[in-house]
Amino acid sequence: MPEKIKNYIAGEWIEAASGNTFESRNPADSREVIGLIPDSNAEDVDKAVAAARSAFPSWSQTPAPLRGEILFRAGELLVKRKVPLGELVCREMGKIMPESLGDVQEAIDMLYYMGGEGRRLSGETVPSELPNKDARSLRAPIGVFAQITPWNFPIAIPSWKLAPALVAGNTLVYKPAEESPVCATRLVEILVESGLPSGVLNLVHGFGESVGEPMVRHPDVDGVSFTGSNAVGEKLAAICGTQHKDYMMETGGKNAIIIMDDANLDLAVSGALWGGFGTTGQRCTASSRLIVQNGIYDRFLETFTRRAEKLKVGNGLEKGLETKIDIGPIISKEQHQKVLDYIEIGLNEGATLHLGGKPYCEGSCAYGTFIEPTIFTDVRPAMRIAQEEIFGPVVSVIRVSELEEAIALANDVPFGLSSAIYSQDVNTTAIAERDLDAGLIYINASTIGAEIQLPFGGTKRTGLGPREAGGRGGALDFYTQWKVIYRDFSGQLQKAQIDD
C-alpha cells in the first residue's frame, strides 16, 4: 500500500480540508505509487498562514543562535538518513543514485551553513558624527513567507529557502512541487524533529492553481520565494507587485559552454556530457548549447558523440546497475511529451538529428518516461531549440569562428543563468569572464556545480528579485530587513546635519 502523506499545519499532521488526494508515482516505473498526497485548497492555505502569523512573534524573538542550533540538528539527522533519503529522491524524482545522494548532501551543507549564520547575522557599527552617540544597523526578520519549490531538486532547493528564512526569524508556508511531495515531507519531518516550534513551518501539498496562487495572494503573507517556470514566476511576481510584497523568483536558463580550439578536449567533452545529460538535462543550469570553435569542432563532435552513445539509460535503483546508470527518466508523462515535441520542432526547423531523439523503452524502462541522449547539429542561433529551455537530455552543437562570435551567441538568448568556457589561454578566459552575461561563470568546468556559500541566480529572464543561497547578496538579504539604531547618551538635544 502506498504511504498516505499529510499536510503539516500548526504543529499537526492533518489531511486536506477537501479529503481528496492525488498520487505521486515513480517516473522510472509508473506502476509504483510512492504516496497518496493531500489535494489541498485555499481553506488549507488560510489555516497555514494563520498558524505562521500566530507563531511569528515568538519565533522572531527567539535568539538567532538557538534558531541556528535547530538547523544544525536537522543537518545531523540528514547525515544519518542520507542513504534512505537518496533512495527516495531516486524513486520519486528519478535521479540516479549518485546525484540523489548529492541532492541530500547539498541540503546538509545548506543547513550547516545557515545554522552558522545564527551566530553571525551581522550588521554594521559605524562612528557617529556627534559626540556621545553611536550608530549601528542590524538584520530583523520580516514576517510570513510563502515558499514554492520545484521537483528537480526535491531536498536541496527546499533547504535553500527554508534554512535562511528560518534562521532569520521568519515563519513559513511551504508548498513543494506536486511531483516530489514525499521527499519534501521527509525534510519537514526532520526539521520538526529537530525542534521547530508549532506554526513556524507549515507544509501544504497541492497544485499551483489551488494552493500556490492562494498562498501568494494571501494578505497575511509578507513575501514569496518561487523556483519554477518563467510563465508562473512572472505571473506570481506581478501579483506580488500589486500587493507590495517582496519576492524572489528563480526561473529559466538556456546555458552555453564555449569550447575554444586550445581547450583540453577530453576535459571539455566530460564537462559537456555532465552539463548536457546530467540529471537527464533537468536542471536550470543544464548545458543545452555547446558553442565550438572551428578548429576543434570535428574532433569534439566525434568524441562527444562516441561517449554519449555509451551513456546508460535506466532506473537508478535497478539491482546490480545502481552505479552504472548515467541517465534517469524524465519526471512525468507531460514533460516527456514536451521534450519529444521539442525534438520534432528541431527537425522541422532544419537542424540535423545527430544522435538519439527517441523514447527509450528497453527492458524495465518500458514502464518509465525515458528519452535517449539527443544531439542536434546544424543548429542556427535563432532556432527554438537554441533559444528555449527544453529541460531534457537534448543538446545543440553550434560551430563558430572566433571568441567574440562565441560570446555574442552565448549571450543571445532571453536567459542569463550560467555560462562556461574551456580554454588554456588566460586572456581568453578573462575576456569571457568579463563579457558573458550570466550570473554564474565557469572556467574549464561545466555550467552546473554551484556551491551554497555564494549567491545563486542570473540575469535577464532567468529570475526576478534577489539571489538564492549564501554569501554577500544571497538569501539572507531577502529574508531580513535592515533596522538602523541611533543611541544618544549625551543627555542633551543634539541636531545632526544642522550648522551651529
Image (cartoon, helix red, strand yellow):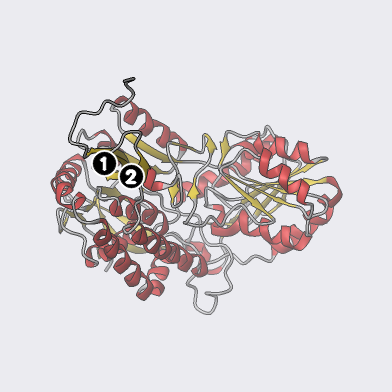
Residue 327 at x, y percent in the picture: 57, 62
Q: Which residue is disc 1 drawn over? A: 142
Residue 49 at x, y percent in the picture: 19, 43
Viewer-proximal residue among 471 and 315: 471
Q: Is residue 120 left or right of residue 458?
A: left
Residue 218 at x, y percent in the picture: 22, 35
Q: Tally the numbered discs.
A: 2
Report whether residue 258 is seen.
yes
Figure check: 139 above or below 77? above
SS state under label 2 = helix
Q: Residue furthest right?
A: 295
- Residue type, label 2: Tyr
Give the quadrant of the C terminus: top left
Report whether residue 31 is seen.
no
**Residues marked 2 and 1 touching at CB (< 8 Å):** yes
Residue 166 at x, y percent in the picture: 28, 53
Q: Which residue is disc 2 drawn over? A: 479
Q: Residue at x 44, y 66 (%)?
A: 105
Q: Is residue 488 left or right of residue 400?
A: left
- Residue type, label 1: Ile
Q: Residue furthest top?
A: 499
**Dividing the picture into quarters, in which one does residue 81 lie?**
bottom left
Give the quadrant of the N terminus: bottom left
How crowded pointer 1 is (Cα within 10 Å; few <14, some 14-19, many 20+) is rated as many
Figure check: 25 above or below 224? below
* For marks 2 and 1 on the same chain, the one whose residue lies earlier in the sequence: 1
SS state under label 1 = loop
Label 2 to label 1, Cα distance in Å?
7 Å
